[in-house]
Amino acid sequence: MIKYQKFHKPTVICVIFAFLLLVLSNVSSADGLQIKKILVDRALGLGVPPTLALAVAKVESDFNPNALSSVGARGIMQIMPQTAREEYGATARSLWNPEINIQIGVDYLYKLYKQYDQRWDLALSHYNGGTLRGRGGDAKPHRYTRKYVNKVFHWQERFRNENAIFKLRSRLEVQGVNRGNGIKILSPRKEVRLKNILDYRNGQLRRRFPWILSF
């Protein structure tokens, strides 16, 4: 027979709160992965480097679909309602939809890339600071967007290197040998090789980008 046990209210509240935190953290993680997948898919569909699309979203909102800037830019790609309305006929409210926001943001990036003769530095300057002076590849970027543009390129490089290391790890693991219980592991020599390569690449990243605290 199970005896009835009385719990104090604070204990119950703490348990419920901990459970909610666990659930919300899992949902947040899943949403983050889904957002990145949408970004990559949309970028590939338009011919925009996926690493650049990811970098813009990271710098603009840190992948937050509910981000709202002091000037009214909304969502993951920080789209201004006026731009959405004039360029795509989209409502301000629709910008809270992650898929619509990403679609407009990546499409607009590609449009600016073509407008400025395939120069991403100029496209990013316009994306962040508005129309540039001059036409095509001869346009002049806004000085006040220099830090923004450099930050996007830094994050693009980081995403590119993360992807390269992931591919390298996968390739070396495929070349490993099977030992016991069907578990695939690397030979000792290849384990050392992988560690040396990863340490070298991580060292390169930290020297080039000191602001990266962890990798």
Image (spheres, helix red, strand yellow):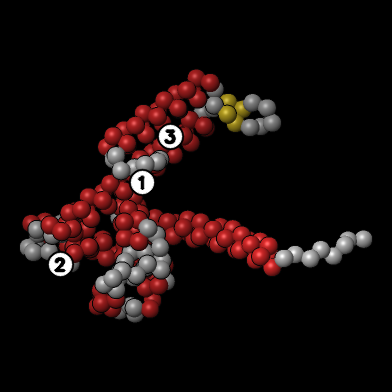
Q: Which mark is residue 168?
A: 3
Specify whether 168 is left or right of 181.
Answer: left
The residue drawn where x is 34% and y is 58% is: 57
Mark 2: secondary structure: loop
Q: Position of residue 70 (x, y in %)?
A: 28, 70
Residue 136, by quadrant, is bottom left
Mark 1: secondary structure: helix
Whichever of labels 2 and 3 marks the residue nearer the N terminus, that label is 2
Residue type pointed to by label 3: Leu
Q: Which mark is residue 159?
A: 1
Specify whether 158 is left or right of 179.
Answer: left
44 or 73, nearer to the observer: 73
Whichever of labels 2 and 1 marks the residue nearer the N terminus, that label is 2
Q: CA distance from mark 2 to mark 1?
A: 28 Å
Q: CA distance from mark 2 to mark 3?
A: 41 Å
Q: Nearer the viewer, mark 3 or mark 1?
A: 1
Q: Which mark is residue 131?
A: 2
